[in-house]
Amino acid sequence: MAVATAAGLATNVFPFRDARAAPDPVLEAGPVAHGSLPVPLVLDNGSFQARAGWACPGPDPGPEPRLQFRAVCARGRGGARGGAGPQVGNALGSLEPLRWMLRSPFDRNVPVNLELQELLLDYSFQHLGVSSQGCVDHPIVLTEAVCTPLYSRQMMSELLFECYRIPKVAYGIDSLFSFYHNNPKNMISSGLIISSGYQCTHILPILEGRLDARNCKRINLGGSQAAGYLQRLLQLKYPGHLAAITLSRMEEILHEHSYIAEDYVEELQKWRCPDYYENNVHKMQLPFSSKLLGSTLTSEEKQERRQQQLRRLQELNARRREEKLQLDQERLDRLLYVQELLEDGQMDQFHKALIELNMDSPEELQSYIQKLSAAVEQAKQKILQAEVSLEVDVVDSKPETPDLEQLEPSLEDVENINDFEPLFSEETPEVEKPVTTVQPVFNLAAYHQLFVGTERIRAPEIIFQPSLIGEEQAGIAETLQYILDRYPKDVQELLVQNVLLTGGNMMYPGMKVRIEKELLEMRPFQSSFQVQLAANPVLDAWYGARDWALDHLDNEDVWITRKDYEEKGGGYLREHCASNVYIPIRLPKQASRSAEAQASGKGSGASGGGAGEQA
């Protein structure tokens, strides 16, 4: 959360950073093989951000992941954006102009669109200096969601082994990697993991170092839903700034200005106090243009602008006069043709034409011909006069004919140059005056400010109270109580002694205190528990996967090799301390179906034979 200085507390005005992602450089070739084993490649495949780097053996395993980018792609229509093809991750820069084009390979936190997933992998390999042409000759450690469907893992394995031809892969749960990274090595521990990310929140019980998959629970809420809720709140509060209240800015408010209330109802009561509100509200300054505060045009520039407006007006009037003259001439020719029918004695055709013109008598026809002839002649004279004198003029009032539509009062109705004076408010009358700044009736900067008060706690509160956004789900506290009630009391005591908070959505100030308060309310009197926040809730999953890869580099029992993939299928999983539980799908054997078909054939043949004997 952004901390205001002593001077800033008086105003609490915070500008939006609107940060743009810098394009990732293409790094040098990957590290060389150490001995007979190549260096593993660690990919933390998150639904919000993907992280990739190397697990280099040795005393110094290397810095943080060399590549971090948003897990989104944008494809232009027909090679848009200069024909550069699909844009991935940090190559997009700012996401808001392309928000309608963004695509993600994830449904919630499970990859389902492997075509987009391939783009993310290509981007990672390319910027890490790995040649993906032919094969990627590096083992890969890849994170996945809790209880990933076998079909999703099968598609991922098929992509890795068939498209990139990797030698072996290991799958692991991101929050479990973070759990083992924050616990001492070589220590079989039990505990509870509360992991909240961009799309989902998981509560995972760990018993003797292994995941108890039967009792883990998921809440379908995370940072994405909090950002959407905050956007709706502020758009309803400030309907005049709908376009400026973007998801990227809402994520910035969540990451830097939101916090978790220890007691939500009590905190809302504090916000009712005007002094508390004034001291704690954050005023987010939207960008605006100060040029609207006054005119800085010189007299020459104003005169030039006025001349341009007059020229445009002259062109518009001349075009309208010509169009009107053409229409009037066509109507006059039509009326004269009808009059000729009368003079030639073709009465039947004359009466039909008179009915089409909605006229009752030849006298009425003659009257309209005279009026229209006068209007045409007058228009021709005005066009000639305008060409000679270059003055702005208009056609006089139009004859009242049934076919002529009266135009609405417009700039054509102005008769001379002097009548244009009211149309140019910025034109000073005859005597020039010095240019002065127009003082606005309100502060334009204050008008473009978003007052973020109780919204700072309302948006992140949804993971504790999903009913705030209409979700019929249990919050973290109720789900935690439900999981603990499924174990005996001694196991409950063991689990609550090691509660780890991990994931980007757990980084709100006050989150640890809130979880401790919820545990204090649900645990027995004078019982103990221990809650810790991960050292780096965002990157600890990648660090844990890197440490695991280094520890199990020579252990073939935890890697899925190409041979395993070809023999046992893409859904196969080798279990380890940070993996999911492998539950294969048992399909009925084909032999049993053929046996049933043979049995049914024999039964039908026997019944047919009995019928023949009776016959």
Image (cartoon, helix red, strand yellow):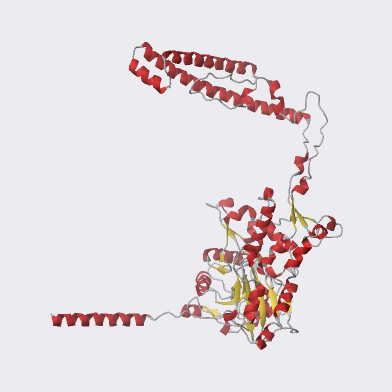
Q: Is residue 395 above or below residue 262?
A: above
Dividing the picture into quarters, in which one does residue 206 lie? bottom right
Q: Residue furthest right?
A: 6
Q: Residue furthest top?
A: 343
Looking at the rendered image, the quarter that the C terminus falls into is bottom left
Q: Residue 493, how many percent across, how many down?
A: 69, 85
Residue 477 seen in the figure: yes
Q: Nearer the viewer, residue 262 or 167?
A: 262
Q: Is residue 97 above or below residue 107?
A: above
Residue 34 seen in the figure: no
Q: Residue 551, how many percent across, how many down?
A: 65, 82
Q: Residue furthest left?
A: 615
Dividing the picture into quarters, in which one does residue 455 lie? bottom right
Q: Residue 92, how many percent across, how many down?
A: 63, 57
Left or right placement of residue 513 versus residue 491 in this view: right
Looking at the rendered image, the quarter that the N terminus falls into is bottom right
Q: Residue at x 68, y 49 (%)?
A: 241
Q: Residue 386, how many percent across, how many down?
A: 61, 18
Q: Is residue 389 above or below residue 66?
A: above
Q: Nearer the viewer, residue 92 or 285?
A: 285
Q: Residue at x 70, y 63 (%)?
A: 458
